């Protein structure tokens, strides 16, 4: 008997967000792209996305560089398998995309620190919960004015 499994990916870290005044590039013309209407992958570029917010578009891993923005950095790469059961020999990662991570001292649009806070670091918003990670997710929660960070929770 075969069992089908649906894996839900939630973007907690490096989501595509910024304000227009923060859109600067450290190299490249910004050729981030997405799937075309016919479902095919468009031509990818090794040039930096136009802004941190445009991370997630396709890139050329052979020619891509790391791109620095006020919010953090973007680099070109693929996402590995995230799950407990072996996906089998037919599984293959998707095409490389710009993966953007917030830098130290930044705040994400959801009000969470850009990087996972150390347990005990001061926080302002009681009961605020912030998730960090791509596959296994660590959650930091503001409790009595200090961040409490739990260990990562991974998909089964």
Image (spheres, grey):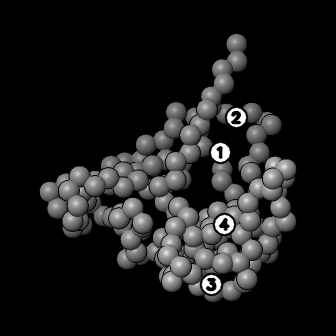
Report helix, strand or loop for mark 2. Answer: loop
CA separation, marks 3 and 2?
37 Å
Of badges 3 and 4, nearer the viewer stands: 3
N-term mark: 3 or 4:
3
Q: In 3D space, how far apart are the residues under numbered discs 2 and 1 (Cα atoms)?
A: 8 Å
> For mark 3, what is the residue?
25
| Residue 111 % position (x, y) | 35, 64
Depth-wise, is mark 1 or mark 4 nearer the camera? 4
Considering only order in the chain, which callout, 4 or 2, is on the residue closer to the N terminus?
A: 2
Instruction: Report, in whole angstroms, how far the alpha carbon at label 3 lies from the one at label 4.
Output: 13 Å
Residue 98 is labelled as 4
Q: Kindly report the distance in space between the C-alpha atoms of the residues bearing marks 2 and 4.
A: 24 Å
- Residue 50 position within the rendered picture, expressed as x and y whole percent measured from the top left: 66, 78
Decide: few, some or many residues near mark 3? Use Cα within 10 Å; few <14, some 14-19, many ≥20: some
Q: Is residue 120 visible from the viewing direction of this image?
A: no
Residue sitting farthest toward the top: 1
Checking the image for residue 87, the label placed there is: 2
Instruction: Determine which quarter of the picture holds residue 35.
Output: bottom right
């Amino acid at each position: 008997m075969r069992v089908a499994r649906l894996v839900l990916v939630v973007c907690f870290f490096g989501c595509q967000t910024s304000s227009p005044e923060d859109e600067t590039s450290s190299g490249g013309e910004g050729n981030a792209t997405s799937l075309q209407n016919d479902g095919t992958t468009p031509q990818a570029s090794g040039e930096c996305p136009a802004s941190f917010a445009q991370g997630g578009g396709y890139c050329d891993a052979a020619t891509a560089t790391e791109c620095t923005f006020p919010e953090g950095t973007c680099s070109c790469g693929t996402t590995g398998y995230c799950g407990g059961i072996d996906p089998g020999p037919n599984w293959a990662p998707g095409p490389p995309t710009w993966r953007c991570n917030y830098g130290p001292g930044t705040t994400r649009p959801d009000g969470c620190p850009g990087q996972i806070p150390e347990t005990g670091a001061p926080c302002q918003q009681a009961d605020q919960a912030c998730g960090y990670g791509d596959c296994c997710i660590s959650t930091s929660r503001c409790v009595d004015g200090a961040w409490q960070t739990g260990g990562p929770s991974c998909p089964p």
